[in-house]
Image: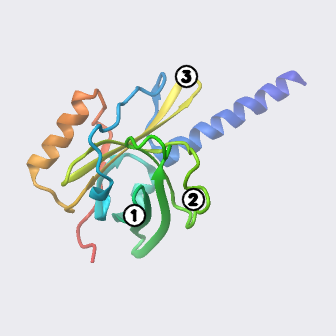
Amino acid sequence: MAMHQTGRVIGALVATLMSLASVNGTVFLGSCPNQPVATSFDTTSFVGDWYEYSSYVGLGQVAFRCPKEKYSIIIPGRFNVEQERIILGVKNTVKGQMKFADPKNLEAKLSISFVEGAFDGRWTEVTPPNYNVLKADPAFIIVWDCTNLVAIHFPTLRILTRQPNPPQFVIDEIYKELEDRGISTGLLLKNSLDDCS
């Protein structure tokens, strides 16, 4: 009986790991590394359109192209988010909200949810950060999140740029920042951002 339960627990753990890996595509040994967030962080710099230039490999990337996000301010520190992708040739738009994870501590740790009205009535609550801005620049944003599970971790890394095809010096600056932080760039996959209209 105990072996049967152990087998079920192991099966559930393997299923969870496969689920996380299929969404994220990246698995590393050990715990999530501590990545300090940006110290100079102006939320008004988020406003407008951003292109997801690249991100860690995930199975979902096979099916979509032209990932784009639009941020608009509700009030300072609170945003509406509109995420757009072309999935199998059809434009798909998802709406959500974003806020400071801890509204009393306005550091670059935010909570984002692509459920419309996700934070309505909860704007002042402390929520888990899942959108950590490592660096914000007028030309790009580096977004990080990481989930620990037993002896492994699942990092999420996304590079948002103002232009679908930014100049090489912008890409060089992004990669230098990641390398200085010890973040692996080998699994970054450039998204397809051509013929998006």
User: Please, what secondary structure does the residue beneath circle 2 have?
Assistant: loop
Which disc, if any, is residue 151?
A: 3
Number of the front mark, 1 or 3: 3
Amino acid carrying mark 3 in the image: Ala
User: Please, what secondary structure does the residue beneath circle 1 have?
Assistant: strand
The spot of residue 124 in percent (x, y) is: 56, 51
Amino acid carrying mark 2 in the image: Phe
Q: Which residue is mark 1?
A: 64
Q: CA distance from mark 1 to mark 2?
A: 27 Å
The spot of residue 33 in percent (x, y) is: 41, 26
Pointer 2: residues within 10 angstroms few (<14), some, or many (20+)? some
Q: Are marks 3 and 2 in contact (CB under 8 Å)?
A: no
Q: Is residue 178 left or right of residue 73?
A: left
- Which quadrant of the view contains residue 73? bottom left
- Residue at the limit of the structure toward the front, as seen here: 104
Residue occupying image coordinates x 90% and y 25% = 1
Tell me which label, 1 or 3, sits earlier in the chain.
Answer: 1
Q: Which residue is mark 2?
A: 119
Seen from the viewer's position, the closer of residues 26 and 4 is: 26
Pointer 1: residues within 10 angstroms few (<14), some, or many (20+)? some
The spot of residue 103 in percent (x, y) is: 49, 47
